[in-house]
Amino acid sequence: MALDQYQEEEEGMSFLDHLEALRWHLLRSVAAILIFSVIAFLSKSIVFGIIILGPSKVDFLTYRVLCDISDYLGIAALCIDELPFTIQSRQMTGQFSMHMTSSFVVGFVVAFPYVFWEFWKFISPGLYDQEKNAARGAVFFVSLLFFLGAAFGYYILSPLSINFLSNYQLDPSILNEFDISSYVTTLIMLVLASAIMFQLPVVIYFLSMSGLVTSGMLRAYRRHAIVVILVLAAVITPPDVISQLLIAMPILVLYEAGINIAKRLEKKRAIKEAEYAKKEAE
């Protein structure tokens, strides 16, 4: 009864009422991000010393795993035991500004499930009951894919890209001395880009649920999708082929998963239509 009353109130809300509701959802989301950002800012030794600067050190988890695999397979080239670069701050405000930026990004990543829940709470009253049932668990799956993408960007894409770029030299006389802003920006870009790109199955799910795309359409435009994914990978990653392929491959897998999701939705829709037609015939 309370839910029906809440839905009736939502339906009767004016445009200004919706704006007011949106304002409160945004304020709570921003507050959550700021709270976690402040915690991250105060935890400088953990956020910077361990998380942000982790991929720049040879004892990082990914490098240690690669060295273990190298020892097991007897392929010395897989072991990354040297990162020939140094990180410097060439601007007076460089370290402080990167401290602020990284703290905000960490706060956003940690608060993402709550932020998306606030967003979903705002739009869900406008959905039909059938759409709500179909989108059940959206907050969980979106958050899961977000964190999986962020983990892929942090543990796979970032360290391998950093290793490639730090070892790339035009001439041995040129030393790689990266500015702290360049390093942090590259790391953040790779992690957030991976987290966003991993939302592809969710996007395909909602497009398929609304009837805008079909599994046949996705299969027909598979070649076009591959080109688009490779172009996006080239845009959001550093200018090296390895990083582009590393992010393109899982996205292609997710695209194929999206085709299967669309196919299952079409089967369910066909079954419901058949049941409805049968009832109408009776």
Image (cartoon, rainbow, N blue to C red):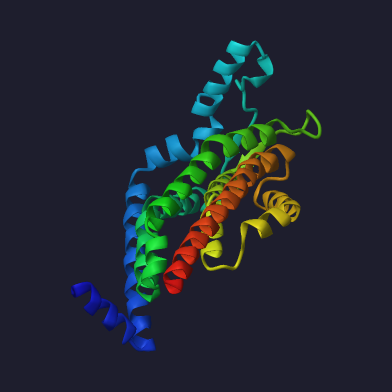
Residue sitting at the far left: 1
196 versus 71 height, above or below: below
Q: Would residue 196 be visible to someone looking at this image? A: no
Q: Is residue 258 above or below residue 83?
A: below
Q: Quadrant of the C terminus?
A: bottom left
Residue 128's x, y, as percent? 39, 73
Residue at the image point whose x is 35% and y is 61% from the top = 117
| Camera-nearest residue between 17 and 178 | 17
Given the current orientation, which residue lies at the most extreme right position? Answer: 171
Image quadrant in which you'd find residue 165 = top right
| Camera-nearest residue between 173 and 181 | 181
Q: Is residue 10 above or below residue 107?
A: below
Q: Percent from the top left, x then y, of residue 160? A: 62, 33
Q: Looking at the image, which residue is at 34% across and 53% down?
A: 36
- For the residue pair 207 and 108, the one nearer the viewer reads as 207
Q: Quadrant of residue 173?
A: top right
Residue at the extreme front of the image, as rendered: 282
Q: Which residue is at 27% across, 83% downward?
A: 9
The quarter of the image holding the N terminus is bottom left
State the image coordinates of residue 64 (x, y, percent, origin top left): 52, 21
Q: Is residue 115 left or right of residue 60?
A: left
